[in-house]
């Protein structure tokens, strides 16, 4: 996707360009902010691509409680990655390996 940038590199339309906090191109996203998962529970089709974005200064990840369905790398502040949802329908609980009090659910349909 092309974006128009001004002379100073800023997007004159306020679209955020390639800002790390932007999730505009993601159909499904899990945001980590305030030591909590935002946008959960998240319902997705089987195999859907999911964006994970960490806005906290602490490192976080998204690890399925069952230990096998999905486990992301730890992300630092403003880091992002994508992973694919499981292909088997069901409800998947997940947590952060560094902060087990952070809990979320991924519902695959």
Image (tube, rainbow, N blue to C red):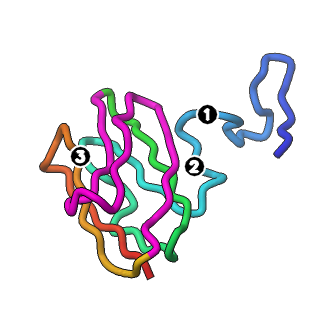
Return the residue nearer the eye: 14 or 104: 104
Q: Is residue 80 above or below residue 29?
A: above
Q: Quadrant of the C terminus?
A: bottom left
- The circle on residue 23 is 2
What SS does tag 2 mark?
loop
Q: Residue furthest top?
A: 8
Q: Is residue 3 left or right of residue 53?
A: right
Query: Residue at left 53%, top 38%?
Result: 21
Quadrant of the rendered image containing residue 22: top right
Q: How many marks?
A: 3
C-alpha gap between disc 3 and disc 1: 24 Å
Question: Is there a contact, CB below 8 Å, between mark 3 and mark 2?
Answer: no
The Cα–Cα distance between marks 3 and 2, rounded to whole angstroms, is 20 Å
Q: Earlier in the sequence, mark 3 or mark 2?
A: 2
Q: Which residue is mark 1?
A: 19
Question: Residue 107 placed where, x, y %?
Answer: 37, 75
- Earlier-in-chain disc, 3 versus 1: 1
Instruction: Tell us which disc is closer to us: 3 or 2.
Output: 3
Task: Classify 10 Å Cα crowding around label 2: few (below 14), some (14-19), many (20 and above).
Answer: some
Q: Which mark is residue 96?
A: 3
| Labelled pair 3, 1 in contact (Cβ < 8 Å) | no
Magenta residues (range): 58-87
């Amino acid at each position: 996707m092309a974006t128009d940038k001004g002379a100073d590199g800023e997007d004159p339309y306020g679209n955020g360009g390639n800002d790390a906090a932007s999730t505009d191109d993601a159909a499904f996203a899990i945001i980590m902010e305030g030591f909590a998962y935002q946008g959960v529970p998240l319902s997705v089709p089987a195999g859907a691509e999911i964006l994970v974005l960490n806005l906290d200064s602490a490192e976080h990840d998204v690890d399925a409680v069952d230990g096998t369905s999905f486990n992301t790398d730890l992300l630092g502040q403003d880091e992002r990655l994508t992973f694919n949802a499981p292909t088997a329908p069901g409800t998947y609980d997940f947590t952060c390996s560094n902060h087990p009090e952070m809990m979320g659910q991924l519902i695959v349909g």
